[in-house]
Amino acid sequence: MIAARTATVAQLSVCYADGQDIGKRLVEDGLAWSFRKYSHDYDVDQEKARFRGKGVWQAETETPWDFRAHKWDSAIQSVPDRRCPIKGNINDKGERIYHAPWSPWYAKTNVNIEHGERWFCDEAEAVSAGRRAPYWGRDR
């Protein structure tokens, strides 16, 4: 694995198996997107996959980060301060959980300030306040 730091302090890693770049292979086969926010290493591979209609490029598609951005923008419209759409709630077991707008439970989750629940502007803030992300597809 090779790791590098960018100006945004994100750590990027490249994973190899048998000398082959796994990320490159996934992008070439249309099974992943080139995450252009942090790197342009796989841009050519993505364009080739798109041209050939491989994987996600078989139909009209939206990148995961665009999907989340649209969910975020939509959620901003319905929060009290129009800035912080992450819901920090406390479940029946007393667990402190946060729900980002793309969480499957977001629409069902209400924030009750009187019960110690609150809104957060980003996931790091929620984690710092002792919240955890919801468990997706597994029981705890």
Image (spheres, helix red, strand yellow):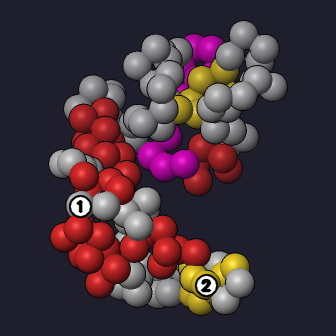
Q: CA distance from mark 2 to mark 1?
A: 23 Å
Q: Which residue is mark 1?
A: 53
Dot 1: few (<14), some (14–19), or many (≥20) neighbours within 10 Å? Answer: some
Q: Quadrant of residue 80?
A: top left
Q: Is 72 placed above or below 41 here?
A: above
Q: Position of residue 14 (x, y in %)?
A: 60, 81
120 or 97, nearer to the observer: 97
Quadrant including the C terminus: top right
* Relative height, residue 110 to residue 24 (above, below): above
Residue 87 in view (yes/no): yes
Query: Which residue matches tag 2?
Result: 20
Q: Residue furthest top?
A: 92
As shown in the figure, which amino acid type bears the numbered disc 2?
Answer: Gln
The residue positioned 71% from the left and 84% from the top of the image is 18
**Residue 28 location, x and y as percent?**
39, 73
Secondary structure found at label 2? strand
Asked whether the viewer can see residue 37, the reply is no
